[in-house]
Image (cartoon, rainbow, N blue to C red):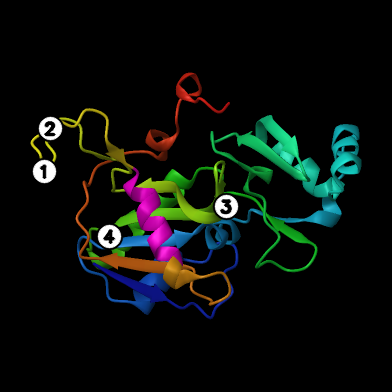
């Protein structure tokens, strides 16, 4: 398996053709997996907010004073969230409208201009599907697309990249019904392959390398019309909420 970094010097702006930028940077093969950092999707989809335009509510101001956070950021977090799961040590763990459980609704001020913040894409599955379809239209290459972002983990230190959108790839590699090396039947083993590929791609993408895209080549995967929803654990099966 190869992981090929794509260095993009251009600052992505709204309505840029990311598929064209990818094809101009690398010759794709059928079966490649294109992993794209969420930040450039948010920039392309104009999900960047000028904080000077945000008017914090009384609730946002109250939370801000309690946790020493910018009330404008708190207001954005609240607007992007279904509910607050936890609040502690200056961090708000929320459930976003897309169903992700993450810190601060995925809102990030890194790699954007001072005084601005990036929101998550409205629907990263649709974002991934659009890029996949455009790449096929422009190159006739049948590839898969993963949109990735950096998430923390509840019981481990450090952060890893997770998939927040997929197209052309089943995000779960299900071993149920197969047998292990001792011929025992596997019943519940399901690997989050989209998350594993996202984490592997981050090793070449980094945070300051101007490398928001990676191509994974020679990796077998199940190609279908799955959704990122398959990776979201239902609340009634979640032991930590």
Q: Secondary structure at mark 2?
A: loop
Q: Which mark is drawn over residue 136? A: 4
Q: Which mark is drawn over residue 13? A: none
Rendered location of residue 124, percent (x, y): 48, 47
Vertical side of 168 occupied by 23: above or below: below
How many residues crowd mark 1 within 10 Å: few (<14), some (14–19), many (20+)?
Answer: few
Check if mark 2's residue and mark 1's residue have beta carbons within 8 Å: no
Q: Quadrant of residue 208?
A: bottom right
Q: Residue furthest top?
A: 236
Left or right relative to 188: residue 239: right
Q: Earlier in the sequence, mark 4 or mark 3?
A: 4
Report the residue at 69% width, 31% height from top.
84
Of residue 197 and residue 71, the one placed in the foreground of this image is 197
Q: Which mark is drawn over residue 184? A: 2
Residue that carries the numbered disc 1 in the rendered image: 181
Residue that carries the numbered disc 3 in the rendered image: 157
Residue bounds of the magenta highlight: 192-202
Residue 43 visible (yes or no): yes
Q: Earlier in the sequence, mark 4 or mark 1?
A: 4
Q: Earlier in the sequence, mark 2 or mark 4?
A: 4
Left or right relative to 39: residue 167: left
Q: Nearer the viewer, mark 4 or mark 1?
A: 1
Q: Secondary structure at mark 3?
A: strand
How many residues crowd mark 3 within 10 Å: few (<14), some (14–19), many (20+)?
Answer: few
Rendered location of residue 233, percent (x, y): 44, 30
């Amino acid at each position: 398996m190869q992981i090929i970094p794509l260095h993009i010097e251009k600052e992505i702006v709204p309505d840029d053709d990311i598929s064209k930028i990818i094809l101009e940077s690398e010759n794709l093969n059928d079966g490649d997996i294109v992993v794209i950092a969420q930040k450039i999707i948010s920039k392309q989809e104009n999900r960047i907010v000028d904080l000077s335009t945000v008017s914090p509510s009384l609730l946002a101001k109250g939370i801000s004073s309690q946790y020493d956070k910018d009330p404008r950021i708190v207001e954005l977090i609240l607007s992007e969230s279904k509910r607050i799961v936890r609040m502690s040590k200056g961090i708000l763990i929320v459930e976003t409208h897309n169903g992700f459980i993450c810190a601060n609704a995925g809102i990030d001020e890194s790699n954007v201009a001072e005084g601005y913040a990036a929101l998550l894409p409205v629907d990263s599955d649709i974002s991934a599907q659009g890029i996949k379809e455009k790449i096929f239209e422009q190159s006739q290459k049948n590839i898969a697309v993963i949109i990735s972002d950096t998430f923390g983990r509840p019981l481990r230190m450090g952060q890893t990249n997770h998939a927040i959108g997929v197209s052309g790839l089943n995000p779960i590699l299900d071993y149920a019904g197969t047998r292990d090396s001792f011929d025992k039947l596997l019943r519940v083993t399901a690997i989050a392959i989209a998350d594993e590929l996202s984490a592997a791609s981050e090793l070449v993408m980094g945070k300051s390398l101007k490398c928001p895209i990676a191509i994974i080549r020679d990796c077998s995967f199940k190609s279908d019309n799955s959704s990122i929803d398959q990776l979201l654990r239902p609340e009634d099966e979640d032991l930590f909420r």
